[in-house]
Amino acid sequence: MGHRDLIRTLERIFRRAEVELAMSEGFHPRPRMRFCEPLAVGQAGTDEVMDLEIGSPCNPDELLNRLNHLSVPGLEFTQIVPLDALEKKLKAKSFWYATDLESEVVNDTETKVQQFLLRSTYLLRKQKSEVEIDIRPLVLDLRVKDQCLMMHLAATQEAGVRPIEILELLGVSPVPSSGTLLTRTAVQL
């Protein structure tokens, strides 16, 4: 499911749950909901975070039960944390990703991962902007475990590194598991 489809699905779930959503101003008002970083098509998320503004206070446990009862298969709400109005909007510090590997490339990928981690810098030319950035400090952890490549990548406001770019530099073609190439397993705020 693409990000826009997910947003529309969430809007319908909140409408069915009779949750009054705060709306943006302007010609095309939209609910005030925001993800730290939208998932790309072909990526799954197992622990995503969404910032949502609602119009009236509610009991978080009751709302959680209502949303899960009305949700679509495969989309589960796990926690609702009310934020103080003075708190800043959620910002991600880093993301964890995982992808399955074919058994015959595991050893080669482990070697490439070790070579990458030994480097103090790794310049990568961004295709759209033609700018070179050092991605090495943005890769917080990279490892192969149980035939799975796991990545911990820093989130930045400037040009960052995408998980697909890590796969390309390692020469890895992920094994699609249940229709996805990558799974974002966690978001650190």
Image (spheres, helix red, strand yellow):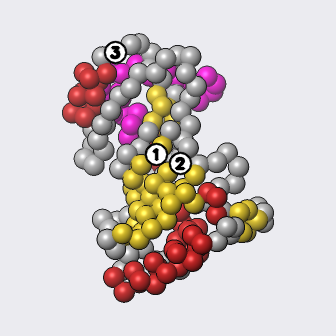
1 or 2: tag closer to the N-terminus:
2
Badge 3: residue crowd in 10 Å (few <14, some 14–19, many ≥20): few
Instruction: Provide residue 74's location: percent of width, then percent of height.
Output: 27, 49
Quadrant position of residue 100: bottom left
The numbered disc on residue 42 is none
Q: What is the CA distance from the residue labelled 2 to the residue labelled 3?
A: 30 Å
Closer to the observer: label 2 or label 3?
A: 2
Q: Quadrant of residue 18?
A: top left
Q: Read off the residue under disc 1.
A: 187
Mark 3 and mark 2 in contact (Cβ < 8 Å)?
A: no
Q: Which residue is mark 3?
A: 58
For the point 52% across and 16% down, which residue is it? 85
Q: Can residue 176 be seen here?
A: no
In front of the other: 1 or 96: 96
User: Circle 2 sits on which residue?
Assistant: 94
Membership of 22 in magenta stretch: yes
* Disc nearest the viewer among 1 and 3: 1
**Magenta part of the chain:** 8-31
The three-letter code of the residue at mark 2 reads: Ser
